Image (cartoon, helix red, strand yellow):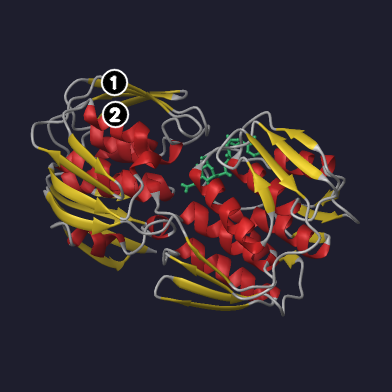
Amino acid sequence: MQKLIIYGPAKLMGEIEVEGAKNAALPILTASILAQNKVIITNIPDIADVRHTIEILKYLGCKVLFENNTVVLDSSSIERFTIPPEYAKLMRSSVLFMGALLSKFRRAELSNHPGGCEIGQRPIDLHISAFRQLGIEVFEHNNRIMCRCDKVKGSEIFLPIPSVGATENIILASIFCDGEVVIKNAAKEPEIADLCHFLNKLGAKIRGAGTHIIKIEGVKRLKSEEVVHKVIPDRIVAGTYLCAVAACGGEVVLKNVFPRHLDSILHILKSSVCKIKELKNEIWIKREERLKGGQRITTHYYPGFPTDLQAPVCSAFAVASGVTIIKETIFENRFKHVPELVKMGADIHVEKDIAMINGVEKLRGCKVFARDLRGGAALFVAGLSAQGVTEVMDADYIDRGYERIEEKYSLLGAKILREKGE
Ligand code: EPZ
């Protein structure tokens, strides 16, 4: 495992391009197996989860080229519909191959429950019950999930939780359905709208993406033209930059970002003395005086405050004045970064789903361990504001979702080294 060595405190200054969104790139790459011709997808982040997804696509038989943040994919030679355990375990989004393979072959097998960050139970019961409502037979045996159907039938599916993954899997499985599939209480995340935008370019008929009601009208076949698609910017990577400036101080311009995807965090930081200006695809942020705490932040489904920014925002308010309360409502076990922040001198108490943060003047650098992707990013942000040297161990977690993080933050004036861990 890698480690990142951060020399704090840093003051972040300058401009930075935000990379493409992991949580849009993964479902879009998965959906590419349905294309009737070559697809060219640009603005793909060079991160571990993308490389793992490409490994799966190649295993299934696709021809894939990945260079300069661009994927060129030809799925005409795809021949398999089973995802082996070693791939299924790698990431949560491996489950999305179920929906896509069912549309491609009317059959799909996941040889193990999907992996991914251990931030809660993360069951897939909503995916499976939706598949059954679509007339798909689902067999579960020894952690294997096997699905098959003759035809996906038009249905109305109500999701008790607006699950991102379940919404995406229903959409992927319904492209060629009989009649129309309607998803009610669908997830509204921008990454889902980007997936639907891509699928409609391939020739699918999807309406209502980005709202709670998504309608998929079945088509006989997809278009035969080549398709080019640019993935949306990563709002969580952008939000992490904003939290880093809030924690460290400085003046930064984020480029290639959609401010409208970040309303919740921008609102919180504006109310905490950060000066912020939003332009079409840019955000300017400046923090001089000490960050002001005292807010109550609750994670919600989009457009509420994203659970994926909960950890980085903890690190920002760990050095703010006053007491800040953070309530995590999406995942049951997503405060693993807190004991590591406390090692750095933070004063944070967690009780069930609530973290109470008594802001301290300064954090001090020490050796800390990443336990998951966003928790790792939180320790990285804390290391930037801390006095002295912070070693973030198991930084591979961070590489799953952030492209060359040490190079990007070095462009903003931070001093960071990457080394092999012990
Ligand atoms: C997606 O995960 C994202 N991952 C997560 O980002 C993100 O935290 C999450 O959505 C919420 O925004 C990707 O897009 C690859 P859910 P997903 O299904 O699809 C429960 C990151 O850091 N649930 O919306 O797994 C579930 O346990 C990652 O980039 C069921 O109970 O999330 C959770 O409590 C981490 N049964 C809630 O719903 C199900 O069948 C939301 O999960 C499915 C979900």
Which secondary structure lies at badge 1? loop
Callout 2 amino acid? Ile
Callout 1 amino acid? Gln
Residue 227 x %, y % = 58, 69
CA distance separating discs 1 and 2: 8 Å
Dot 1 alpha-carbon crowd within 10 angstroms: few under 14, some 14 to 19, many 20 or more: some
Taking depth in this image into account, of 186 and 397 the one nearest to the observer is 186
Residue hosting label 1: 295
Dot 2 alpha-carbon crowd within 10 angstroms: few under 14, some 14 to 19, many 20 or more: some
**N-terminal-most mark, 1 or 2:** 2
Taking depth in this image into account, of 249 and 366 the one nearest to the observer is 249
Residue hosting label 2: 268
Residue 78 x %, y % = 72, 75
Residue 135 x %, y % = 87, 45
Which secondary structure lies at badge 2? helix
Taking depth in this image into account, of 54 and 143 the one nearest to the observer is 54
Picture quarter containing residue 411?
bottom left
Q: Quadrant of the N terminus?
A: bottom left
Cβ of mark 1 under 8 A from ligand 1? no
Q: In this view, does 326 lie to the left or right of 409?
A: right
Residue 88 vertical placement versus 79 (above, below) = above
Q: Is residue 181 left or right of residue 58?
A: right
Circles 1, 2 touching at the beta carbon (< 8 Å): yes
Q: Residue at x 22, y 48 (%)?
A: 383
Q: Residue at x 28, y 50 (%)?
A: 380
Picture quarter containing residue 247?
top left
Q: Quadrant of the C terminus?
A: bottom left
Residue 220 vertical placement versus 367 (above, below) = below
Q: Residue at x 36, y 62 (%)?
A: 403
Q: In this view, does 139 lie to the left or right of 167?
A: right
